[in-house]
Image (spheres, coloured by chain):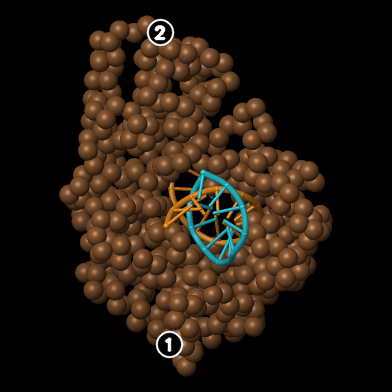
Chain colours: A brown, B orange, C cyan
DNA sequence: AACCCTTTGAAGTGT
DNA sequence: ACACTTCAAAGGGTT
C-alpha cells in the first residue's frame, strides 16, 4: 500500500530508520521507539478511522454465495470426500513448478529419460568416457557459477535487529494496555484488538509458532555479493545423485536458517548452502534451538483474515465443522456475500493493522518472512543454467526408457524452452497441486491507497476469485486454475 | 512432528 | 502494468 509505504511521511519510517550498529543497539532502539509511539499511534489511528471514508468497492463485485458449501458442511457432506483428491483426476496436470526436477523425474539416479525439455528424444548410447567428460564439464560449470552467480540480500536484512513477534511481543500488555496481564502461554491479541476490542475473538492457540522463524533464511551477507558454494547442490543432494558431485555439508558453518540473524550476517563471510531448504533446518545446539523459537515479526492481518478470526467461531458453532479448510471455504463465501459496508469495516481495520505494524516495524518487510527458496526471480540465470545442465545430463545419460512421452518428465518440456523455467522450490517435497494459486495474478489488489483500503473496483473480476469453487466434491465445480502452495 | 488444506488480501519480485 | 509467489490464521487431516 503506497500510503503505508516505508517512506511514507505518515508512518514516520524515515526518522526511525536505524543505522547499522551492533545488535545490542538494534535490539533496544526499535522497542523504545515503539513504546514511545504506540499510544500515540493507537489514538491517532482511532481518530483517523473515524475520519476516513470507506471507499465503496466490494459490493458490486460480490458474487452469489454458494450456500451449498455451508449446507453441506452442516450435514457433513464435505467430509464424504477428500477435498484435495480432485486434482489428481487429470491424466497429467502440470505442476506449477515445471522446472522442479525431483518429482518430475521419478528416479534421478536414472537420469535416463530420453525426453529433453523440448520433447525431443535424446541421443543414446553414450560411452562411459563421454559421460565422464560430461560430468567434468558439469563440475566446471558448477565451479564457474559458484563464483559468478550473485544473490542479493534483501536490504532489510542488512540491519541486525531482534526478531520480534508482531502479535505476542510487540503488543505486550505492558505496552498496549497497562494492567492487562494475559494468561501465560496464551496469545495476545494484535493491534486490531486493542483498537477495537469488541471485534476480537481471543484465541488460546499458540501464535503461529508452528513454523520456524524465516527471518534467518537469508544467506547473503550485507555486501550482497556472496558466492553460492554449490549451485547445483540442491538438485544433486535432493535427487540422490552421485555424491561425488556434492561436497559434504559444511559443518563448520551453521545453516543460515538456524544462525541467529545477529551473528550470521558477517560481511563477506561464507555461509552454508543457501539453496537448501531452511524451513525446518536441523538444530545443532541449544542456542540454535533457542534462536529457532524466537518469533518473527508476522505480517499484519488483512481484511479477510480479520474477518475470519471474528467469524470462525460462529461458523464452527453453526455448521458443526471443525476442519479449517471447510470453514475457510464457508468464510470465503460469506465474505463475498458481505455488503461493502460490512467489508469496509474489515478493510479499515486491516489498514489500521498495517499502519500500526509499519509504525512499530518501519524496517520490516514481508520479504523477511519468506523462507529461503531459490526462485527464478532471485537467480534466473542460475535456474536456467540448472535447467540446461539437467537437460544436458538427461540427454547424456544412456537412454534406458523410451516410455510414453506422457511421463512427468515432459513437464520439463517447455515450448519456449528454458526461458520459461518456473521457480524452483527448494522444499524437500514436491509441491502439491492445488487450485488456488494464481488467483492473485488475475485479480488486482482490492484497496487503493487513495481511497482507503476498501476495494474501489472489482478485484475479483477474473474468474476464480469471484466464485470460489471447492474441489472434488460432487457438488463442486472444478477450479479454473491449478496451483500450489 | 511436520506439513497440508482452504480462503482472501497484502506485498514482494521479475518482466 | 502484469504475472506470479509467499505469508498471514486456523485446526483437523495426512504423511
Q: On screen, A480 above or below A311?
A: above
Disc 2 residue crowd, few under 14, some 14–19, many 20+, Cα 10 Å: some
Q: On screen, A6 above or below A63?
A: below
Residue A386: percent from left, percent from top: 37, 29
- Dot in front, 1 or 2: 2
The residue labelled by disc 1 is A174
Residue A157: percent from left, percent from top: 33, 59
For residue A76, say whether it is visible. Answer: yes
Given residues A96 and A47, the one toward you in this image is A96
For residue A464, say whether it is visible. Answer: no
The residue under the point 66% across, 63% down is A322
Q: In the image, A183: left or right of A252? A: right
Cα gap from disc 1 to disc 2, whole angstroms = 71 Å
Residue A162: percent from left, percent from top: 32, 69
Q: On screen, A145 above or below A273?
A: above
The residue under the point 77% across, 53% down is A77
Q: Are marks 1 and 2 on the same chain?
A: yes
Residue A348: percent from left, percent from top: 63, 72
Disc 1 residue crowd, few under 14, some 14–19, many 20+, Cα 10 Å: few
- In the displayed image of the protein, which residue is found farthest to the bottom? A179
The residue labelled by disc 2 is A124
Does dot 1 land on a helix, a strand or a loop?
helix
Q: In the image, A47: left or right of A238? A: right
The residue under the point 63% across, 40% down is A482
In the rendered image, which quarter contains the N terminus of chain A? Answer: bottom right
Instruction: For mark 1, name the chain.
Output: A
Amino acid at each position: 500500500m503506497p500510503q503505508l509505504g516505508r517512506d511514507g511521511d505518515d508512518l514516520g519510517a524515515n526518522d526511525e530508520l536505524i543505522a547499522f550498529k551492533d545488535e545490542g543497539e538494534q535490539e533496544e532502539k526499535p522497542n523504545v521507539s515503539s513504546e514511545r509511539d504506540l499510544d500515540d499511534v493507537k489514538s491517532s489511528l482511532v481518530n483517523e478511522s473515524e475520519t476516513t471514508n470507506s471507499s465503496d468497492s466490494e459490493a458490486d463485485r460480490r458474487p452469489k454465495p454458494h450456500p451449498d458449501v455451508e449446507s453441506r458442511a452442516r450435514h457433513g457432506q464435505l467430509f464424504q470426500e477428500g477435498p484435495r483428491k480432485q486434482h489428481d483426476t487429470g491424466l497429467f496436470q502440470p505442476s506449477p513448478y515445471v522446472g522442479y526436477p525431483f518429482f518430475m523425474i521419478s528416479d534421478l539416479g536414472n537420469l535416463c529419460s530420453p525426453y529433453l525439455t523440448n520433447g525431443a528424444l535424446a541421443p543414446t548410447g553414450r560411452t562411459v568416457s563421454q559421460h565422464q567428460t560430461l560430468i567434468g564439464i558439469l563440475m566446471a560449470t558448477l565451479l564457474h557459477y559458484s563464483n559468478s552467480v550473485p544473490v542479493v540480500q534483501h536490504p532489510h536484512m542488512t540491519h541486525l535487529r531482534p526478531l520480534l513477534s508482531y502479535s505476542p511481543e510487540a503488543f505486550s500488555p505492558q505496552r498496549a494496555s497497562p494492567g492487562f496481564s494475559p494468561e501465560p502461554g496464551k496469545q495476545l491479541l494484535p493491534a486490531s484488538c486493542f483498537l477495537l476490542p469488541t471485534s476480537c475473538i481471543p484465541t488460546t492457540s499458540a501464535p503461529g509458532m508452528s513454523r520456524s522463524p524465516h527471518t534467518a533464511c537469508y544467506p547473503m551477507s550485507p555486501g550482497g555479493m556472496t558466492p553460492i558454494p554449490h549451485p547445483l547442490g540442491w538438485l544433486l543432494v535432493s535427487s540422490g545423485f552421485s555424491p561425488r558431485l556434492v561436497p559434504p555439508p559444511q559443518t563448520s558453518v551453521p545453516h543460515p536458517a538456524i544462525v541467529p540473524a545477529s551473528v550470521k550476517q558477517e560481511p563477506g563471510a561464507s555461509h552454508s548452502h543457501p539453496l537448501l531448504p531452511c524451513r525446518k533446518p536441523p538444530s545443532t545446539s541449544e542456542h540454535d534451538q533457542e534462536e529457532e523459537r524466537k518469533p518473527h515479526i508476522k505480517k499484519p492481518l488483512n481484511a479477510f483474515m480479520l474477518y475470519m478470526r471474528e467469524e470462525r467461531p460462529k461458523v464452527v458453532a453453526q455448521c458443526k465443522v471443525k476442519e479449517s479448510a471447510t470453514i475457510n471455504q464457508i468464510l470465503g463465501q460469506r465474505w463475498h456475500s458481505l455488503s461493502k459496508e460490512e467489508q469496509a469495516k474489515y478493510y479499515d481495520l486491516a489498514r489500521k493493522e498495517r499502519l500500526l505494524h509499519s509504525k512499530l516495524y518501519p524496517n520490516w518487510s514481508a520479504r523477511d518472512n519468506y523462507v529461503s527458496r531459490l526462485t527464478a526471480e532471485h537467480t534466473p540465470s542460475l535456474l536456467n543454467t540448472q535447467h540446461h545442465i539437467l537437460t544436458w545430463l538427461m540427454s547424456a545419460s544412456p537412454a534406458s526408457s523410451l516410455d510414453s512421452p506422457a511421463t512427468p518428465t515432459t513437464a520439463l518440456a517447455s515450448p519456449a524452452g528454458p526461458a520459461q523455467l518456473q521457480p524452483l522450490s527448494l522444499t524437500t517435497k514436491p509441491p502439491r497441486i492445488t487450485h488456488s494459486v494464481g488467483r492473485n495474478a488475475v485479480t488486482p489488489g482490492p484497496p487503493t491507497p487513495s481511497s482507503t483500503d476498501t476495494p474501489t473496483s472489482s478485484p475479483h473480476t477474473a474468474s476464480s476469485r469471484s466464485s470460489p469453487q471447492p474441489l472434488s466434491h460432487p457438488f463442486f465445480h472444478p477450479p479454473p486454475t491449478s496451483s500450489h502452495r
